[in-house]
C-alpha cells in the first residue's frame, strides 16, 4: 500500500471511530454533544492518530486498543485547540477552515466542550479491554502526564508567559517540547504500548524519534505561519508575528529554520534504524511532518 | 471519635495529601502551579473527599487508594468551580471567601488551571498501585463518566441552557443529578470500590444513599443561596435569583424546600440500613449536608 493510501484509509478509519466514540448528537444535552461533534469531526490532519497507528503497526498492536488510543489523543488535542482559540487565550475565529467553537456556538459551550472531551478521552482508554490492565494503566498514566501541567497545559502556560519576551533557542525548545511535543511523544509511545511492553532500547529509540518529529512539527508550523496564507492553513496565518510571539523563524530566520526541519527529519529516520523496514510508516510520517504545505 | 473530630482529622489529612499530590510551586511553569495550588488548597468543605473516606471506612478500604480517590474527586470538583466562575460562565469574583482564580491571576491561567487539574486527577488514580488493576480501571472509568458530558459537564450545559426557562421539578432534578449528583455519587462509589468489588445489593444501597444526599445537597444550596449572606457562604449569595435561574426555592417555595431536604436526609439514612452501625460516618455526612449553614 502506498503511504498516501495508508494515510487516507487510516484517517477515514479514525474519523469513523471518533464518530462512534462520541456521544450521539441526539443524546442529552443536545447542544453540548453537537458542539463536541462539531469540534472533533470532519477536519484536521489527524497527525497524532497517524503516529499512534504507525507505532502500533511496528509492534503488531491490538487494533481496538490502537483505535482507542488514537481517538483519545485526538480528543485531548482538539480540546486544547478549542480552549486555545477562546478570547482569553489566542482569540481565534478560524480553525480547520471553519468558525471556531466559541464563534459557532458560544464561549461557555466552548469551555464545556473542551472539558468534556478531556473526560471522554480518559473514558475511552479506561473502557478498552483487549490488553493486560497493567499496560492499559500505563497508557492512561502516560496520557494524563502528557496532557497536564508537566506536559501540554504546562507548555501553554509557558507560551502565554513568553509573549513579548526574547526567548533563547533552548527556552523556545523547552516550551514546544511541552506544548506540542508531549502529546506527539505520547502518540508514538501509546501506539507502541498497545502492542507490547517496551524494552529500554525500544523506549530510547521511540523517544528520540518522537523528540525529532515533535520539534520538526513546530519548526515547520512556524515556517508555514510565516509563509503560507490563511486559506491554505485553514487557520489565521501570520498570527505569531502579529502577537509578538517568539518562533523558530523569529529567532533563527527562515532559511535556517527550514534547514533545521530537514535535519530533524534525518534524526527521526536515524532513530528508527534499529527497527528496520517495519518502521516504514513512522519514517514516512516524519517526511510528511516536514514536507507538508499546511 | 466524635463526628466533628473525624471530620476535622479527615479534612486535614486530605489537605496534606492534596498538597503532596500537586506539583510543587517551584516546578516549571511556576505561575500555573502556583495558581493550581491557590485554587485547590486551603479552603472548601471537602464534602466529596469526606464521602469517599466514609464509604471507604464502610468497606475497610486501602488508605492510599482512598486518599487518591478523595483528592482526584476534589481536583475535578475544584477545576469545575474554577471554570464555572469565569466570565463566560457564572462570572463570579468570590469563592471560598477568596478572589476567584481568574481574578487573582487571569482568565487564561484559570482556563489552564482547570484543564491541568482534570489531567492531574486521572494521573492520581492511574498512579495508585495497591488494589487489583481491574478495580482501579473501574474507578477511572467511573470518574471519567461522572465528569464528562453524561455527568458534571452535561449538567452544566443543561444549567446554561435553562436560564430564564420555567423548568419542571423533574427537569430541575435531572439537571442537578448530572451537575452535582454525578460527582457526589462517584465519591461514594469510588470510596467503596477502594475497598472491594461491589455486589448488586451494595450498589443499589449506595446509589440510593448517593442520590438522596446529592439532591439534598442541591436543595440546601438553593435554600442557603436564598437565605444566607455572602460572608457566611464564602461566595456571592442570591446569585441564582438574580440570574433568573430555576431553583428548588423558586419552584417549591422556601418551607417546602426545607421539608424536602429533611425528607431526603431520612431517605439517605434508610438506604444505609443494610450496613448497620458501620455506615455511621455516611449517616452523619447526610446530616451534615442537610443541616449545614454554609
Image (cartoon, coloured by chain):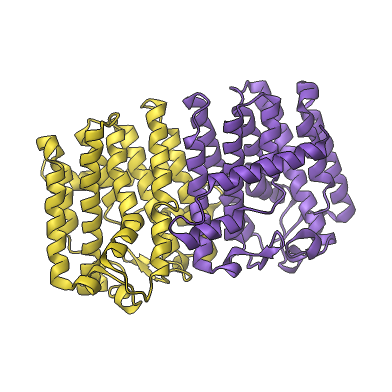
Chain colours: A yellow, B purple
Instruction: Name the residue rendered at 38%, 65% in the picture.
Output: A159
Left or right, residue B75 beside residue A178: right
Task: Answer yes or no: is residue A139 visible.
Answer: yes
Residue B277's spot in the image, x, y percent? 80, 23
The answer to which quarter of the image holds residue B62 is top right
Query: Residue pushed farthest front?
Result: B26
Instruction: Name the residue rendered at 25%, 54% in the picture.
Output: A214
Instruction: Name the residue rendered at 59%, 46% in the picture.
Output: B18
The front one of A167 and B113 is A167
Task: Answer yes or no: is residue B157 visible.
Answer: no
Residue A162's spot in the image, x, y percent? 38, 70
The front one of A60 and A203 is A203
Q: How many marks can you see?
A: 0
Residue B99's spot in the image, x, y percent? 65, 66
The answer to which quarter of the image holds residue A290 is bottom left
- Vertical placement of residue B288 versus B97, above or below: above
Left or right, residue B180 beside residue A244: right
The answer to which quarter of the image holds residue A221 is bottom left
Q: Quadrant of the C terminus of chain A?
A: bottom left
Residue A190's spot in the image, x, y percent? 32, 39
Query: Residue pushed farthest right?
Result: B255
The front one of B6 and B117 is B6
Q: Quadrant of the N terminus of chain A?
A: top left
- Vertical placement of residue A153 versus B139, above or below: below
Amino acid at each position: 500500500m502506498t503511504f498516501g493510501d495508508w494515510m487516507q484509509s487510516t484517517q477515514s478509519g479514525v474519523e469513523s471511530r471518533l464518530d462512534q466514540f462520541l456521544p450521539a448528537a441526539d443524546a442529552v444535552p443536545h447542544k453540548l454533544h453537537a458542539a463536541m461533534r462539531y469540534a472533533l469531526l470532519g477536519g484536521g490532519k489527524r497527525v497524532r492518530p497517524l503516529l499512534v497507528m504507525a507505532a502500533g503497526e511496528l509492534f503488531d498492536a491490538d487494533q481496538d486498543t490502537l483505535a482507542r488510543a488514537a481517538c483519545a489523543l485526538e480528543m485531548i488535542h482538539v480540546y486544547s485547540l478549542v480552549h486555545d482559540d477562546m478570547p482569553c487565550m489566542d482569540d481565534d475565529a478560524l480553525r480547520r477552515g471553519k468558525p471556531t467553537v466559541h464563534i459557532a456556538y458560544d464561549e461557555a459551550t466552548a469551555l464545556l466542550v473542551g472539558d468534556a472531551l478531556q473526560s471522554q478521552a480518559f473514558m475511552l482508554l479506561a473502557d478498552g479491554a483487549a490488553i493486560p490492565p497493567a499496560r492499559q494503566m500505563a497508557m492512561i498514566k502516560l496520557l494524563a502526564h502528557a496532557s497536564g501541567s508537566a506536559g501540554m497545559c504546562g507548555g501553554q502556560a509557558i507560551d502565554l508567559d513568553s509573549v513579548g519576551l526574547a526567548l533563547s533557542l533552548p527556552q523556545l525548545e523547552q516550551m514546544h517540547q511541552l506544548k506540542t511535543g508531549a502529546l506527539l511523544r505520547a502518540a508514538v509511545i501509546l501506539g507502541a504500548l498497545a502492542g507490547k511492553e517496551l524494552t529500554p532500547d525500544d523506549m530510547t529509540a521511540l523517544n528520540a524519534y518522537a523528540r525529532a518529529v515533535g520539534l520538526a512539527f513546530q519548526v515547520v508550523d512556524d515556517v508555514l505561519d510565516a509563509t503560507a496564507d490563511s486559506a491554505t492553513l485553514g487557520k489565521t496565518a501570520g498570527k505569531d508575528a502579529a502577537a509578538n510571539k517568539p518562533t523558530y523563524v523569529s529567532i533563527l530566520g527562515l532559511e535556517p529554520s527550514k534547514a533545521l526541519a530537514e535535519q530533524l527529519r534525518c534524526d527521526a529516520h536515524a532513530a528508527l534504524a534499529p527497527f528496520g523496514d517495519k518502521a516504514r510508516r513512522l519514517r514516512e510520517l516524519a517526511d510528511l511532518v516536514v514536507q507538508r504545505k499546511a
